[in-house]
């Protein structure tokens, strides 16, 4: 059985801080789990120093719009790592971010969800 695209390093023993160079937050603008990503057309190849995870992130975002959470799921990486990789690729001009559609739910919606859960 073949590995799904982007999951080739699933069994890597690398810790998150190794993948992010010890950084705990993305550089630049706010990158949330609901931030939408699209790959920008490449005018030049990625530098040789680009990590396999950055290359895989560009591959999965090349097929259309994905949220940071979806990209993390496709890559089987923690969201915190993907947020930092996104920040790096945005700074390099390889990814474009779009504000996510998530807004805080209203009190009425939360009540409906709670009532629905109680009915289960």
Image: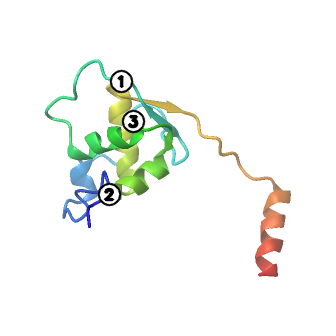
Question: Visible in this render: residue 24?
Answer: yes
Write the residue at 80% across / 79% down. Answer: 118
Kindly report the distance in space between the C-alpha atoms of the residues bearing marks 1 and 2. Answer: 27 Å
Q: Secondary structure at mark 1?
A: loop
| Picture quadrant where residue 101 is located | top right
Left or right, 113 with reference to 90 = right
Quarter of the image with the C terminus in it = bottom right
Comparing labels 1 and 2, the label whose residue is closer to the camera: 2
**Residue bearing mark 3:** 62
Image quarter (top left, top right, bottom left or bottom right) of the N terminus: bottom left
Residue at the extreme right: 108
Q: Tell me residue 41's x, y (percent).
A: 37, 23
Tag 1–tag 3 contact (CB < 8 Å): no
Query: Closer to the camera: disc 1 or disc 3?
Result: 3
Q: What is the spatial separation of the Cα atoms under label 3 and label 2, in whole angstroms? A: 16 Å
What residue sits right under mark 2 in the picture? Answer: 4
Total marks in image = 3
């Amino acid at each position: 059985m073949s590995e799904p695209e982007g999951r080739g390093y699933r069994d890597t023993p690398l810790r998150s801080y190794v993948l992010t160079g010890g950084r705990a937050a993305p550089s630049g603008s706010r990158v949330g789990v609901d931030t939408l990503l699209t790959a920008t057309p490449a005018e030049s190849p990625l530098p040789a120093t680009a990590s396999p995870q950055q290359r895989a992130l560009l591959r999965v975002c090349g097929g259309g719009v994905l949220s940071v959470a979806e990209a993390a799921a496709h890559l089987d990486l923690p969201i915190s790592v993907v947020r930092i990789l996104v920040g790096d690729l945005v700074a390099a001009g390889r990814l474009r971010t779009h504000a996510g559609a998530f807004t805080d739910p209203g009190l009425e919606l939360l009540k409906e969800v709670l009532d629905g859960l109680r009915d289960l």
